[in-house]
Amino acid sequence: MDQDQREVAKLWRVYRTIHQLAHDRGYLVSQAELDMDLEQFKNMYARAGMVDRNSLTFLVQKKDDPSDQLLVFFPEEKSVGVKPIRKYCERMVTQGIPKGVIVYQGTMTSSANKVIDQMSAKYNLESFHESELLVNITEHQLVPIHVVLAPEEKRTLLQRYRLKETQLPRIQPSDPVARYYGLKRGQVVKIIRPSETAGRYLTYRLCL
């Protein structure tokens, strides 16, 4: 397999995982996108033998809230600087899209990260290196099932056990699974582990 073919195969895996991520966050993703195999990916995005990363950009919306949209970008630049970030932000502002994900292949400059931080008050722009999306970490046998609680489910949990949220064990936003689900400060995730005695063992963690 030559370098171009390896690059196409890598991008197919990344493309598949980022669609699974969007689906697992509750966004509408077609089954065809989730099931797309390498040959279908080549026919759609790499007919000339190479992938135009801009063509991979896609927009999805939440199943229960059409106004909650997520735009996923694939920069062509090896080192992503301020210029493409500003372009993405302008598109999000123009289209009224509150959330975005940047899937980059090389590095993000400190200036680019600074722009993302400055936008964080109004727009949520995340970034993932391609290497983080080569496999879906939530499918690894050592990673238990994680379920993000809705606000009302969180309230019910705290009332049932008469807890303050600060009494829950914590999970950092930088945790790989927390990043996969896009956990924000104050959200609670239910973790389901298999148990030999009880069938399954539940724990809850608060994102701080």
Image: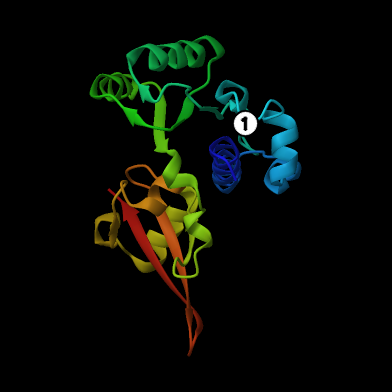
The residue most toward the front is 2
Q: Residue 183: x, y in percent?
A: 40, 45
Q: Quadrant of residue 158?
A: bottom left
Secondary structure type for disc 1: strand
What residue is at 72 percent from the left and 48 percent from the top? 35
Observer-nearest residue: 25 or 34?
34
Q: From what the image shows, is residue 188 above or below residue 64? A: below
What residue is at 41 percent from the left and 66 percent from the top? 160
Amino acid, disc 1: Val
Q: Quadrant of residue 52?
A: top right
Q: Residue 194: x, y in percent?
A: 49, 78
Report the number of discs: 1
The residue most toward the bottom is 197
Q: Residue 72: x, y in percent?
A: 53, 29
Observer-nearest residue: 1 or 148?
1
Q: Residue 119: x, y in percent?
A: 34, 19
Q: Which residue is mark 1?
A: 60
Q: From what the image shows, is residue 90 above or below residue 70? A: above
What residue is at 60 percent from the left and 28 percent from the top? 51
What residue is at 32 percent from the left and 46 percent from the top? 173
